[in-house]
Amino acid sequence: MIGECKLYRNKDNDLLHIDCCERWIISLQPDFLAQKSALVEIIENADHVCIFFPKFYCELNFIERYWKAAKRYT
């Protein structure tokens, strides 16, 4: 069995390909799906909330609003 196939690299979400490569099989396991990333676990263990914004959506990012206000002020 191969480690990673073309379907996995292309993010083909066809459920008929459940045994095409090792990465695909592992990614479908329930314990693997429920695992949080190390960054999220560290932040949540410190009693904080971890929020990830969508990529390339600057309207939700605080720093973009801050820079907009700073530019307007100057």
Image (cartoon, rainbow, N blue to C red):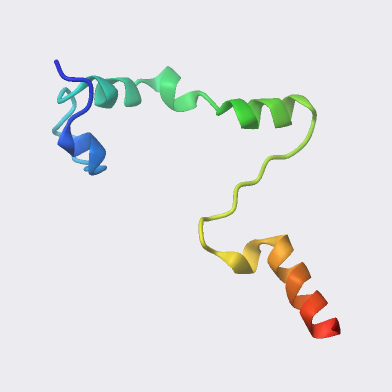
Question: Measured along the vertical axis of the image, is residue 73 above or below residue 1?
Answer: below
Question: Measured along the vertical axis of the image, is residue 56 above or below residue 53?
Answer: below
Residue ID at (19%, 23%): 21
Q: Nearer the viewer, residue 67 or 27?
A: 67
Residue 25 occupies quadrant: top left
Left or right of 50, for residue 17 = left
Question: Measured along the vertical axis of the image, is residue 1 above or below residue 8?
Answer: above
Q: Find residue 20 and report its horizontal and vertical position in percent.
A: 15, 25
Q: Quadrant of the N terminus?
A: top left
Q: Find residue 34 and report its horizontal and vertical position in percent.
A: 48, 25
Q: Residue furthest right?
A: 73
Left or right of 70, for residue 60 = left
Q: Find residue 43 and report its horizontal and vertical position in percent.
A: 72, 31
Left or right of 28, for residue 74 = right
Residue ID at (73%, 62%): 63
Q: Find residue 4 and report its horizontal and vertical position in percent.
A: 22, 27
Residue ID at (79%, 27%): 46
Residue 44 occupies quadrant: top right
Left or right of 55, for residue 6 = left
Q: How many marks?
A: 0
Q: Residue furthest top?
A: 1
Q: Nearer the viewer, residue 6 or 30?
A: 6
Q: Nearer the viewer, residue 39 or 26?
A: 39
